[in-house]
Structure formats: structure tokens, C-alpha cells
Image (cartoon, grey):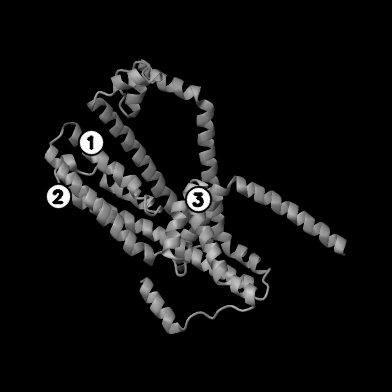
Amino acid sequence: MNGNRFAVALFGILVSVAIAALAFEFIAPLTVSVFLYYSTRRYHQALSRFRLPARIRAAIVMASLAVPLIFLVSYATVLMVVEARQFIEEYALVSVANDNFEWFGGITEIPEFTVQGLYDAYQSGDLAPFIDFATEHATFLTTLVSEFFLNVFIVVIVTYYLLIDGHRISRWLLRFDDEAIIREYLEAVDKELEAVLFGNLLNVLAISLIAIGSFSAYNAFVPAPAEVPYPALAGALTGIASLIPVVGMKIVYVPLVIISALPIVLGGDPTNLAYIAGLVVVAVVVVDTIPDLVLRPLLSGEETHVGLLMLAYTLGPVVLGFYGLFFAPILLVVGLTFANTALPRLLNGSVSEGPPASERGEHAGEQQ
């Protein structure tokens, strides 16, 4: 009997190691999937009031994320290409590119970013340098694109089925309960992850609306040369960048200020730079500082310390790369919840009852 149990245990260990190694290869998309699952689970549950099946609700949630994101990325890409073309033509940078980039191939005019414009450029041979450049780097570009779509596919599939079958995974884990320690810990982790990550989703939406309103209001009071280009797009990107505390939104509004000021510096009315200074104040104070001080504590979760959460978001990408932005806060919540729930019972056989109800109420009031 002991021999059979040893064989089963050994087989289980080997299978677990194989699954862990495979999961590690795709840790980035799996981490993003868990992040999205907890960010959208309340939304998925809220749709149940319309008596929709779980699969339909999951599809609605995924579409609600995918469609705006695809539109935003496509819109931003088109605008970036169009604006770059206008900037190159306005400041005669084609000759500069010919002098510094050998593969540019003596192009004298940037084609219009339309179907007809691109077709005419292809017919005339103006696209030949770009095609040759892409051909020379075909292996790298193919690998990059294929890996991107593979990761997106994994994120979509895993998030979709987590929304549908997440409760089944929870029930399976609770089968290994031992004196209620596992149950208490898993339920606490589940609740806190949902509170923290759903709060992040609300924070992104709130920052996006604040940024769009602030940039639009700024444009209403300044002359055309000092306006923020595409305030709705800039505001939406600012909201997404707010996932990274301290430096996140600066990734968007610092280049935005530079882009707004560049035409003035290169040949506009210098007095308009005063409006650019006003844009800096709006971006730093109204869009960045005030919402970060007010909203983030309200949306950071019930138990997780705001400072530790900000540190996790900041250091995660530095240590782990891109996926650390999603993995670090999840790891923080899992670790802190273990320290608050399971660890006391494991050490002394009991779990603290916590502060009296009156103190908990006062603590909640302080967080609000």
C-alpha cells in the first residue's frame, strides 16, 4: 500500500513539475489572464441580473475589453502615422532620413496614408526600400508578430474560461481543506484580489474620464497652436498608463506636452508657450497628483496597504519585466493575506479575532 502511494505521489510530482515548467514558459499571458479575471469578475457577476448564461456573460465581458482596446490601438496607430507624415513633410525631414538611413533609398516623398496613396507608391517603387527592409528582417518580424498573437490568444482563452469555471477551481482547491486554514486563506485571497484588481479597473476608467475632460477643457480656452492634439485619445491612453503608479501617466503626458510645444518652438508665436506651461500644470496637478492621492487609496483594496501596492506596481516591471506590472501586485496580495490569516494559526494554533467592530468601522472610515 505504501509502495502504491509512493508511486502515485511520485507520478503527481512529475506531472506537477511538467505543468509548472510549461506554465513558466507562458507566465506573462497567464499572469495577465489572472489579472483580467479578477478585474472583470464583478462585471461578469453583475450581468447575471439580466439572466444571461455564464458563457454569454463572459463573451460580453471579453468583447467589452477587446473592442475598445482594438479601436484605441488602431486609432492611435493611424493618427501616429498620419501626423508623422505631416511632420516629416512640414519640416523637410526626408532629406535628413536619406542622409542618415541607407535603407531609405533616396525617397523624395512620403506616400499618403490611404489605400490609393499606398497603391500608387507601390506602383512607382517608393515602397521598395521599406519592403526590402521588412524582407531582410522577416524572421525577426515573423517571430515577433506570431508571439504577440499567441500570447493574446492565451490571454483571451484563459480569461474566458476563468470567468466561466472559476468557481469550479475554487471548489476543487477547497477539497484539500485542513481545519479550515485553507478555506479561510483561499477565501481571503480571492476577496482581496478582487477588491484590489477591480479597483485598478475603476481607477483606469476614472483617470481616463478626468484626463479627457481636463484636456478638452484646456483646449476650449487656448489658441489653436497650443491645443492638445486628440484630447480623447490622449486621455484614454493616460488612464491606461495610470496602472503604473508614480511614473505611469508621465509616459503619456510628458510626450504630449513636448508634441504640443514643438511646433511653437520650431516657428510659432513664443507667447503661446505660456499656454503650454498651463498644460503642464493641468497634467501634473489635475490629471496626475489629485486623482492619485484621492482615488488610489479608495480603490486599493480592503487590507492591502496602499504604499506597498504602489511599490509592487513600481518595482514589479523593474525586476520581472513587463508582466511584473501584473504579477507583483498579485504576489503581494497572496503574501500579505497569508501573513494575516494562515500564518498566525500555523504558528500558535489560533487566528486573531481582529479589532472590535467599532475600531473596524473607524478604520474603514479612515480609508474612505
Q: Secondary structure at mark 1?
A: helix
Q: Quadrant of the N terminus?
A: bottom right
Residue of label 1:
262
Q: Secondary structure at mark 3?
A: helix
Is any part of residue 323 visible from this angle? no
**Mark 1 surroundings: few (<14), some (14-19) or many (≥20) residues within 10 A:** some
Image quadrant in which you'd find residue 123: top left
Residue of label 2:
221
C-alpha gap between disc 1 and disc 3? 34 Å
Residue at the image position 52 percent from the left and 40 percent from the top: 149
x and y percentages locating residue 308 in the rendered image: 45, 61
x and y percentages locating residue 50 in the rendered image: 44, 66
Is 205 left, or right, of 218 in this rendering? right
x and y percentages locating residue 75 in the rendered image: 34, 41
Q: Are marks 1 and 2 in contact (CB under 8 Å)?
A: no
Q: What's the amino acid at mark 1? A: Leu
**Mark 3 surroundings: few (<14), some (14-19) or many (≥20) residues within 10 A:** many
Residue of label 3:
324
C-alpha gap between disc 1 and disc 2? 19 Å
Work out whether 140 lies above or below 362. above
Q: What's the amino acid at mark 2? A: Phe
Residue in the foreground of this view, choosing between 224 and 287 = 287
Residue in the foreground of this view, choosing between 107 and 271 = 271
Residue at the image position 55 percent from the left and 79 percent from the top: 352
